[in-house]
Image (cartoon, rainbow, N blue to C red):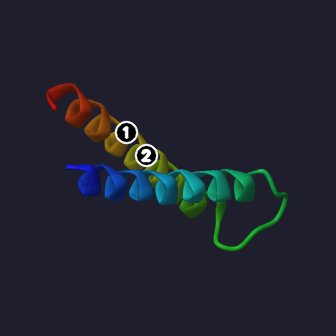
Amino acid sequence: MSVFLIVLSCITLAFASGAVYYIKLLSQAASYPPKRVIRQKALVCSTGTAFTLCLIFFTKLLA
């Protein structure tokens, strides 16, 4: 069980760092790829972070 939580924590960390990176890219004036693509990637990373945090929460709740 603890290995599962460690793996989920690592996935959460990866998603969160990706979200921060893409949100930081959005704040720059000119960038490649287009802002629409960066916004989509930031949204996917943020959703992944929320989903894995929910998985960790419910795993801890049930254990």
Of the 4 image quadrants, the one containing the C terminus is top left
**Viewer-nearest residue: 54 or 48:** 54
**Viewer-nearest residue: 12 or 6:** 6
**Viewer-nearest residue: 5 or 35:** 5
Q: Is 27 on the left-hand or right-hand side of 11?
A: right
User: Which residue in the protein does label 2 denote?
Assistant: 49
Displayed quadrant of residue 62: top left
Q: Does residue 7 lie above or below 43 as drawn?
A: below
Amino acid type of the residue tagged 1 in the rendering: Leu
Number of marks present in the image shown: 2
Determine the residue located farthest toward the front in the rendered image.
2
Determine the residue located farthest toward the bottom in the rendered image.
32
Q: Estimate the spatial distance between the alpha carbons at disc 2 and disc 1, rounded to whole Å.
A: 6 Å
* Residue at the spot 25% in from the left edge and 32% down from the top edge: 60
Which circle, 2 or 1, is nearer the viewer? 1
Element type at mark 1: helix
Quick check: marks 2 and 1 in contact, CB under 8 Å? yes
The label on residue 39 is: none
* Residue at the spot 64% in from the left edge and 72% down from the top edge: 33
Displayed quadrant of residue 52: top left
Residue 4 lies, in percent from the top left, at 25, 54
Displayed quadrant of residue 6: bottom left
Callout 1 crowding tier (Cα within 10 Å): few <14, some 14–19, many ≥20: some
Residue 36 lies, in percent from the top left, at 58, 57
Determine the residue located farthest toward the top in the rendered image.
61
Callout 2 crowding tier (Cα within 10 Å): few <14, some 14–19, many ≥20: many
User: Which residue in the protein does label 1 denote?
Assistant: 53
Element type at mark 2: helix
Residue 18 lies, in percent from the top left, at 56, 59
